[in-house]
Image (cartoon, rainbow, N blue to C red):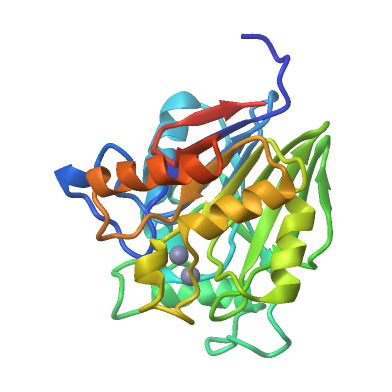
Amino acid sequence: MGNDFRFRMTFWGVRGSTPTPQIENLNYGGNTCCLEVRLPNEEVFIFDAGTGVRNLGDSLLEEFPDQKLTLKVFLTHFHWDHIQGIPFFQPLYHAENQVIFHSVAFPEGQYRRCGSNNGLEEALKIQMADPYFPISFDSLPAKKEFIQIDPEPLKFGNLTITPFPLNHPGQTFGYRIESEGAVVVYATDLEHGHKKLDRVLREVSENADLLIFDSQYTPEDYGKHRKWGHSTWLEACRAASDAKVKQLALFHHHPSYDDRKFYQIIQKARGEFENTIGSQEGWSLIL
Ligand SMILES: [Zn+2]
Ligand SMILES: [Zn+2]
């Protein structure tokens, strides 16, 4: 196809909490959170770097074998399932590439244990520090940048990325991704029931083409996991209806829910919000 689209969004990891590479989970996928947004000019934006980012990295090197890559990564927060693919992200192992990490700035002074320039860099260094990983983050040859952003719209040509706060343990931000009227809202990880943030979520999602929503639990299981920072498929449907989005993608699948169980959840969710899908590794939306 020609360049008559605004962007393409692809799921590379949809699982919450921990990878689940068992055969009974592989229809929807076992890798943890990672999305790719690709512009018509081939610019690549990556949202979260769970284990799904490993496959994305390999695929980019195969697609652009002789090209310098400049990749922009936006992290929602630093729980393992959102950063654990970084040590295995092959573009970082090539000096000609540049990887620019973004996250909303931490309060001054937080996470400065190893004397990094900022909390974002620090959080990424720590996960690869001795004794957790054999190669240090600093020694990865790609050029790395760490940009702590304000929760304000950020423009990249026609693309606008707007962070918005989510109710989750530790500082967490979702992203509204918009280009020429095409809108995808990436809202993970979050727990419903925070009046103000529930309203913010609905505002940023209004009439979106796709709302990607943390629906880790069934409403029954949620009862046992209050304050763990996650929501349910039913709350996802409510947010989708309130915001009048075109499509809802259930995301951050519970590690213990296999494909069969998840299929039943999607059927139930469709009774509440008709255009609901289960996020599935490899699925793309072209807008
Ligand atoms: Zn998570
Ligand atoms: Zn989390």
Q: Please say if 186 is above or below 148.
A: above
Frontmost residue, 277 versus 252: 277
Residue 57 shows up from this direction: no
Q: Give x and y (percent) for residue 29.
A: 31, 43
Q: Give x and y (percent) for residue 52.
A: 39, 48
Residue shown at 66%/33% (left/top)?
A: 43
Frontmost residue, 107 versus 28: 28
Q: Is residue 83 left or right of residue 196?
A: left
Residue shown at 36%/67% (left/top)?
A: 220
Q: Please say if 2 is above or below 76.
A: above
Q: Give x and y (percent) for residue 138.
A: 49, 68
Q: Quadrant of residue 245?
A: top right
- Toward the top, the furthest residue is 1
Looking at the rendering, in which quadrant would you find the C terminus?
top right
Q: Is residue 95 left or right of residue 265?
A: right
Q: In what quadrant does ligand 1 lie?
A: bottom left
Residue shown at 56%/75% (left/top)?
A: 168
Looking at the rendering, in which quadrant would you find the N terminus?
top right
Q: Quadrant of residue 256?
A: bottom left
Residue shown at 48%/48% (left/top)?
A: 250
- Toward the left, the furthest residue is 23
Q: Give x and y (percent) for residue 94.
A: 46, 45
Q: Quadrant of residue 127?
A: bottom left
